[in-house]
Amino acid sequence: MTAQPPVTYEKFLAHAAADPAVVGLVLKGSHAHDGMATEHSDHDLYVVLADDAAVPDLGRRTPGLDVVVVPLAGLRAAGMPGFERYALARARVVLDRLDGEIGRILAAKARLTADEAFRTAAGWLDAYANSLYRSVKNARDGESLAARLDAADSLGFLLEFLFALDRRPRPYNKYLRWELAHHPLPGWDTAALLDTVEHIAATGDVRAQRALFARVEPAARTAGHGAVLDDWGEDLLLMRPADG
């Protein structure tokens, strides 16, 4: 028997769109980010069904097509909270039979509420300070590997914090440059921030870490998170520039 060729993205879209149980199609991943798709990128697609619909036979996953079938309620819940939030926040609506409701659901994922942003930012700031402190202390004590590892950890927490301040989910590492190029963080020079993050990730440079903290601390205090930093007491002196 001759093997059937894998279903293409375009053919799958036509097949899914023809099924009345399908109320929405959402494309996420590299193909939803202009200029990010490569020859190795598959199409990541959410197929959204009416909540009371039976799951239709839409075929199988192929090397170029990754399909997730969810009811409408499942789309609302996806990433709230969770790893999928950023992917869906930047996803593209391919089909919406609900008068814009699919788009509104995605838009809600792209914007943290004020309470959520403030609460999560506080936690990420504390985690950033913790890893920064450990990195600087380990460097002081001659533990170079531990210092670099803690520095790398601190950058992830810092990015979570900075995006939470702007009420946005942090992008996946793959999309960090894309996100900042298309949607810069207020008050931060994108090129300078990325260069600093890359340098610290590669070297664990204590001077660079302290200089970055000198930028973060006033931003954190202006946003109302001074108490988080003040809880560190005199340990803040180790995080700040030595000549500050």
Image: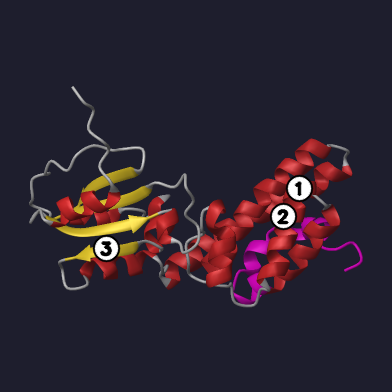
The kind of secondary structure element at disc 1 is helix
Disc 3 is placed on an element classified as strand
| Mark drawn on residue 53 | none
Q: How many marks?
A: 3
Which numbered marker is on residue 198?
A: 2
Q: Amino acid at mark 2?
A: Glu
Quote the CA–CA distance across marks 3 and 1. 39 Å
User: Residue 4's x, y, as percent?
Assistant: 22, 32
C-alpha gap between disc 2 and disc 1: 6 Å
Disc 3 target residue: 94
The answer to which quarter of the image holds residue 224 is bottom right
Mark carried by residue 202: 1
Q: Position of residue 147 (x, y in %)?
A: 78, 42
The boundaries of the magenta stretch are 219-244
> In terms of sequence position, does the residue under pointer 2 or pointer 3 come before the other?
3
Residue count near mark 3 (Cα–Cα under 10 Å), binned few <14, some 14–19, many ≥20: some
Is residue 96 covered in magenta? no
Left of 32 or right of it: where is 227? right
Q: Where residue 73 appears, x then y in whole percent?
A: 20, 55
The amino acid type, in three-letter code, at marker 3 is: Val
Local SS, label 2: helix
**As drawn, 135 above or below 34:** above
Q: Is residue 128 left or right of residue 21?
A: right
Q: Are marks 2 and 3 in contact (CB under 8 Å)?
A: no
Are discs 2 and 1 less than 8 Å apart at CB? yes
